[in-house]
Every structure is written in structure tokens, then in C-alpha cells.
Amino acid sequence: MRLVEIEDLHVSFSQHDGLVQAVRGVSFGLDSGESLGIVGESGSGKSVTCAALLRLLREPPAKITAKTLSLSGHSVLGISNRAISTLRGRVAAMVFQDPMTSLDPVFTIGHQIAETILAHRKVTKREALAQAVELLRRVEIKNPGAVTNYYPHQLSGGMLQRAMIAMALSCEPDVLIADEPTTALDVTIQAQILQLIKDIQAETGMGLIMITHDLGVIAETVDRVVVMYGGKVMETGPVEAIFSAPLHPYTRALLNSVPGQTAGKQRLVEIAGSSPNPSHPPAGCPFHPRCPLAVAECRQTAPPLETKAAGRQAACIRVAAEMVAA
């Protein structure tokens, strides 16, 4: 079953000095039980894409257009706030990057999880609180009954993120969107959170969209990857294929910039230049000002996202035939 369908999504924001083009023609989908990673530098449009999918952006100043934008077969374009509210939590849920700013500091953890359950299910408050305890136990929080009475400031970062995951899972959504869920956590807790998400997905069969700039997280967590840059999709494909033989120069640059790939002392490899200004994106391919392979055509015409091999797409005219064969 197709859980997410995005075709030709554009998201812009009106400002006093012009229009910010955050997402420009993004297309991808997600099937039941599939894990999809969206990777790219900060400002590439990853989070805005998923926020638009859940209609979390205030309109205006945001303007969202697409040929298709749907969740489990339900179009989210042009529907009322009440209608989209029935889909959030029940059909798709989101775990945000910073749980401390995502949770309300004046309500207990149990109250906030129960509130989500009460919004989507016909249960009593006592039943909702009992389900909150069970959800906290499910995400491996010790003494969950006591934790339901805690306030956010009384929990560590790792426990807060577990509570956020419990809240997201409270209505058994078809799709879980995890937006940088491990950024503020140490390495040990990060590994635990990632394993927890994988275990729950295997148990429930839900689809997963993992948004991150951490290629290590992508390698460990997902089946398929969408690489974004400058509000556009640069490359898509199976995670193993993209890591072993990236097609787009931007994907190769991202992988080369990861430190510690070979033994011994080496200079860190950086991507020269800076990300494009979304208020004034460059003509042609958005990566051409930083691309060592750019030619005149790259500066004039934006290449479409095209199939270059089975299950693989790239938006680049310089994809070499030998790389596709690999």
C-alpha cells in the first residue's frame, strides 16, 4: 500500500523582501513497511517537505502546491484544519528534533500522551492514562507509572525523546516521521533510540521517514534514500547502492566529507562554497556553483530527476555511463 505520495511539491514563504523558495518540485513516495531516509545539508528542504505533508506550516506566509500530496490515500491539499487534524496522529505522526521545545512544560508527560489518545479514540481519561503508562513501558522507560507524573524538565534528553516516540505511537499511525530524532543525544542513547524505532517498525509494520544530515544514521536505519539540495531532489535509490556507487556529484561530495573513512591522518574533505540562497536560487542545477564537474549547460538548465538504472534516479547530466553500470 502506498502510504505517502508526493508529486511536484512546491513550498514557498512570502517575506517583505521577496519569496523564499524552500521546496522546488520534490517528488517521492513511501510504501507500507518501508524505511525512507531524507538526507542533505541544513536548508535543503528536508523538514519543510514533511511539515508540508502534515500541513504544519501556517498558510500564509507559506504557500503549498503539488500535483499530489497524500497520506494513506487521503489528499491533504485544500482540506480543512479539522480534517487534517483527524489524519495527524492517526494516519501519520512526527517525532521532532528537540523534545524539550516540543513538549509543553506546564503539563505532565502522562497528560500530554493521554491528550493525544483522547483526541483520536473514544476512551475515558483513566483508560487514556493507562495506555500512556503502557506506551512508556513499550519505549523502555523504567517505572513508567511514576514518569507519567513527571514534567518535561524532570527527564533527561534520552527519556524525553522516548516519551515523544511514545506520544507519536499512541494512535498506531501508518507513517512515523522522525525529524533528526537523535541530534541532541550522546552516541550510546542515539543507538538505543534508533534500535527502538527499528524494533517498533518491525513490530507494527508502519512506514518510516527518517530526516537527518547524519549519513551514519541513514546507513543503519533505512532501505531507500532521497538526497535533497537547494529544495530539490538530487538522487534517490537503495541505501546500499547510493553508499557504494553514488551517481550525483553532490551525493559523492557528502559521502567524501564523512571523516574517518580510512586509517591514518588525513585532511577533512569539505564541500567548497555554501548552500544556495532560497530567496535567490541559482539558475540551472542548484549544485552547479559548488560542483567540480559543472559545465555550461549545468548553469543554464535544471536537469530533471531521471531514471539512470533500476530503482535509481538522479538529476544530473554528468552521470557517467560506467557509474550507472556499477
Image (tube, helix red, strand yellow):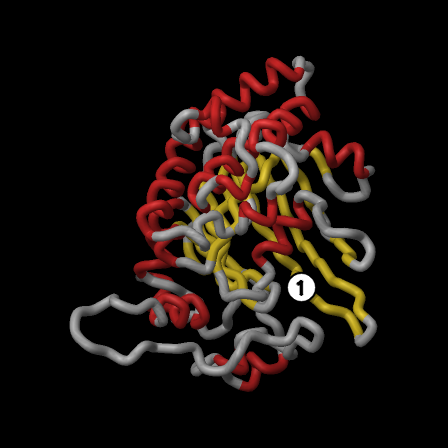
* Quarter placement of the C terminus: bottom left
Quadrant of res 269: bottom left
Residue 223, image x and y in percent? 40, 45
- On screen, residue 270 versus residue 75, left or right, reads left
Amino acid type at image mark 1 = Ala
Q: Relative to 24, say whether 141 is above or below.
A: above
> Which sits in the foreground, 207 or 259?
259
> Which sits in the foreground, 90 or 4?
90
> Which sits in the foreground, 11 or 263?
263
Residue 97, image x and y in percent? 53, 51
Residue 37, image x and y in percent? 46, 50
Quadrant of res 48: bottom right
What residue appears at the point 64 percent right and 29 percent down from the top-left corner?
116
- Specify the farthest residue to the left: 264
Q: How crowded is mark 1: few (under 14 residues within 10 Å), some or many (20 or more)?
A: many
The residue wearing badge 1 is 22
What residue appears at the point 38 percent right and 58 percent down from the top-left corner?
215
Would residue 236 be seen by someone viewing this image from the given angle? no
Residue 98, image x and y in percent? 54, 50
- On screen, residue 211 versus residue 106, left or right, reads left
Q: Relative to 34, say whether 305 is above or below.
A: below
> Which sits in the foreground, 316 or 97?
97
Q: Relative to 78, say whether 111 is above or below.
A: above
What residue appears at the point 54 percent right and 23 percent down from the top-left corner?
132
* Quarter placement of the N terminus: top right
What residue appears at the point 59 percent right and 32 percent down from the top-left corner?
108
Local secondary structure at mark 1 = strand
Would residue 321 be seen by someone viewing this image from the given angle? yes
Quadrant of res 71: top right
- Specify the farthest residue to the bottom: 296
